[in-house]
Amino acid sequence: MPVVTFDILVVFGLVLAAVVLFATEALSPDITAISVIVAVVILEPWTGIGTETAFVGFANTATITVAAMYMLSEGIHRTGIVRRLKRAIASVSRDSETRLLGSTLVLTGGMAGIVNNTPIVAVFIPMVTDLAEKYQISPSKLLMPLSYAAMLGGTLTLVGTSTNLLASTFSERLLDRPFSMFEFTHLGVLVLVVGIAYLMTVGRRLVPTRVEPTIDLLGAFELRKYITRLYVRENSPLVGRTFAAAIDDLPPEFDEDIDVIEVVRADGRYAAPGPEFELDAEDVLTVRADRHTARKIASAFDLWPLPWVRLSELDLSVPASIGTLVEVRVPSASDLAGQRVDDIRFRQRYGATILAVRRGSDIIRERFEDVVLEVDDELLVRTAGDNVDVLRDPGNIVVTAVTGEGVVEPRGSKSPEYREAKAPLAIAIVGGVVLAAATGFVSIGISALAGVVAMIVGGALEPQEAYDAVSWDVIFLLAGMIPLGIALENSGGATFVAEVVVVLAGALPVLAVVGLFYLVTAVMTNLISNNATVALLIPIAVDVAAQLDANAFAFVLAVTFAASTSFLTPIGYQTNLMVYGPGGYEFTDFLRVGAPLQLLLTVVTTLGIWVFWGV
């Protein structure tokens, strides 16, 4: 029976304390990780971790890679590539959370088999977050499944993860059988399909909503049915005239309330067009009016009502430099309180069109010229993106929300300017990062850092943007946990676990032992790095297989697949850490969603190995 030393007990105690702190979040996860660094050094006689070793986590390849991937992701975002990918997925998913989740999982999983899964997640995080905001879905519901799908996709081919490459090296050295490029693709496809099915059903219900979707201003003001688009035909009497003048020429009995809030024509989009704006044939007018009024206007001016579609607020706000939706409030002591909208010439004064007024539980959507403003009235207005500062009228109007932010934008803030001319460069850089790492020319950490430098030098990314893109709490979390993994190895704790497996193996059927190795690997890879787990357990697995006169290659595959699918903690794999911050997750969220998946794949992978290779 394996011997438990005092060193092992001390390190196991640290692991338990860290897990409890992570689970209860008595301290923030990054502070817990920093506390671990302090603890392993104080307990150096038993952990074997001195001051220098305690800080190796900050220079670890995984830590550097995660930081660099955040930066590369920002470069991809700043060059507009994400917007193009987003449009492609949006065309499939539309406004359905199910279709959005499904298309994200399939695309991520498939690509992760060809390209290393870490840069895949780096590219997809901003895209998925943007789509979640567009369709009013919590990004939390999508980001954890994104990470899991990337890990599952990494099992498709040899180059899917660095763990596969390392395991192939051990397989060649111990069994004289390296992995071919598609050695285990058929099992990887099975694992990916089962994993996606779980994430689309059970997992979807287990993933929590930690980050609320950005405020939906059109929905908040119940205005979606009051926005219509009308096409100006060539023979329309509106051609060459202003809308206001045309309305004035209508018979007195035509007493309908309507506002043009945007005009789209071949040369661009015009938000909140003024009363002197002349219309042309083929203009598309976005108007605020009820359906009945819109139909009457269309008939009177020979306009063609466009088929009704669900208009998200982003339809009325992108690009922000052209137009955006803004929520404003009338504060106490405002000079506007007690005045009619028409008397204060709101549109001319602020360059904005009123779409709705909310007063308590009541919402006013028409006849704004006669509305007398009151203190605490909330107005939804449409204005040019660069005109938001005009609405910030101290003492009279307070800006409370701006489309795309959900909160007040700081004075002078601007939407990101996309450097679309740099998009080909950014794609080439990311491709180079992946190719250099996949061919073994340099490590993924070095290739990722080189990619960041290339993006900055090439003008695709600014240095400050790169630093701001990194979730530094995640970096401290990862750097703090790496010394604990080293202590687990130094103290003999990892070896103790492996020896326990060896003892148990003698009392179990061979197939059960394969499953046991999968399960133990899956647990250990959440505490120490997946590559360290592979390096520790594959030799033991081969030795156990020899003792049982079993197929050693089957044992190698069990360890390899388990080490590449670390679902139980955010620190178990780089992609989990990358989505940890943007998804607003708690430490235990990964255990809640990942544990059933880990158990399911233990069965599926073990049986798959038995069917395809035998044990």
Image (cartoon, rainbow, N blue to C red):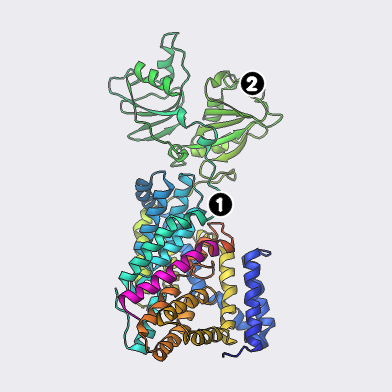
Which quadrant of the figure contains the C terminus?
bottom left
What secondary structure predominates along the stretch shown in magenta? helix
Report the residue marked by disc 2: 339
Q: Residue furthest top?
A: 252
- Magenta highlight on residue 547: no
Which quadrant of the figure contains the N terminus?
bottom right
Q: Which residues fall within the magenta stretch?
A: 591-615
> Helix, strand, or loop for circle 2?
loop
Name the disc covering residue 211, or none: 1
Q: Position of residue 116 (x, y in %)?
A: 38, 69
Q: Residue furthest right?
A: 333
* Camera sees residue 464: yes
Mark 2 is surrounded, within 10 Å at the Cα level, by few (under 14), some (14 to 19) or many (20 or more) other residues, namely some
* Camera sees residue 28: no
Q: Quadrant of residue 189?
A: bottom left
Q: Position of residue 353 (x, y in %)?
A: 51, 28
**Looking at the image, is 273 positioned above or below residue 555?**
above
Disc nearer the start of the sequence (2/1): 1
What amino acid type should be assigned to the residue bearing mark 1? Val
> Which residue is drawn at the image coordinates 44% and 55% (left, top)?
201
Q: Quadrant of residue 580?
A: bottom right
**Looking at the image, is 342 positioned above or below residue 74?**
above
